[in-house]
Image (cartoon, helix red, strand yellow):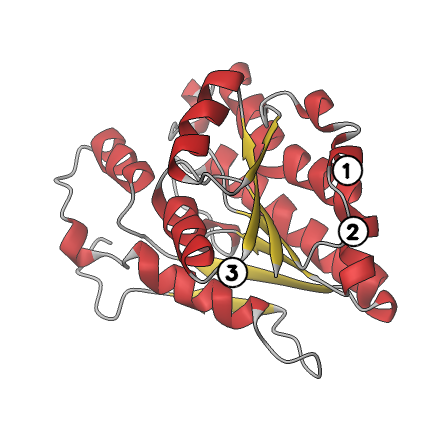
Amino acid sequence: MRHVLTGAGSGIGRALAERLAGRGDDLVLLARSDARAAELAGDFPHAQLLVADLADPGTLNGLGRQVDGAVDSVLHVAGVVDLAPVEGLRLAAWEEHLTVNLTAPAVLTRELLPHLRAARGTVVFVNSSAGLSASAEWSAYAASKFGLRAFADSLRAEEADLGVRVSTVYPSRTATPMQEKVHEQEGRTYDASRWIRPETVVDTILHVVDLPSDATIPDVTVRPLAPRPGA
């Protein structure tokens, strides 16, 4: 199988790339710079590296021409989060959330649709529980993730007759560097053992990708078994 993946540098994306490479699948990884591409090439020597910055979606234009042949899945894992109350929300932060978390996945998906159709492949959007319910200080992040959910729903309706499956995975708090940053912004002590392991989310994503062709999983939510009060 052949997969295009964002966010392979850390967290869920890293665990996912390692799992796919370990089982012998072909990887096409996006890197935001030549330096980052060189780092990823050292970790994934058999992967194709494409340089494009999700914070500048214009760099994604024409990317589909750099990918040869069919693609079995496009896995949107990369994202940004920066908590702030609305009264203190910076325009730059708002725009960054929408650009990286929503616009870039939309453009990348558009670029790769011909390759996905050729394989009757699967698009997986790694969203968030914040894409289902918004909390205080999460307005920018949640808005971008609510938008990503809508984009996935529309894409699913458009592509069903062409054999392309579209799934959204909604992980709750997962033990990643991003989650550590969130705890720091919240002023809370970070304890990775409280949260979902990235490998568990990867298991869910792979279940969606490897599902036999007679079915699809449009949406799946992954939550910690027993979150503590205030989680």
Rendered residue at 33%/37% (across/down): 178
**Callout count:** 3
Q: Is residue 135 visible?
A: yes
Q: What mark, if any, has residue 115 been given in the picture?
A: 2
Q: What mark, if any, has residue 169 been given in the picture?
A: 3
Secondary structure found at label 1:
helix
Q: Amino acid at mark 1?
A: Gly
Rendered residue at 38%/37% (across/down): 43
Q: Is residue 198 left or right of residue 187?
A: right
The residue wearing badge 1 is 64
User: Can you give x and y, in whole percent of width and height, for residue 75 in the image?
Assistant: 57, 51
Q: Amino acid at mark 2?
A: His
User: Can you give x and y, in whole percent of width and height, for residue 44 in the image?
Assistant: 44, 40
Query: Which mark sits nearer the N-terminus, 1 or 3?
Result: 1
Q: Amino acid at mark 3?
A: Val
Quadrant in the rendering for residue 103: top right
Q: Quadrant of the N terminus?
A: bottom right
Q: Are marks 2 and 1 in contact (CB under 8 Å)?
A: yes
Quadrant in the rendering for residue 57: top right
Rendered residue at 63%/80% (across/down): 212
User: Can you give x and y, in whole percent of width and height, for residue 154 in the image?
Assistant: 77, 56
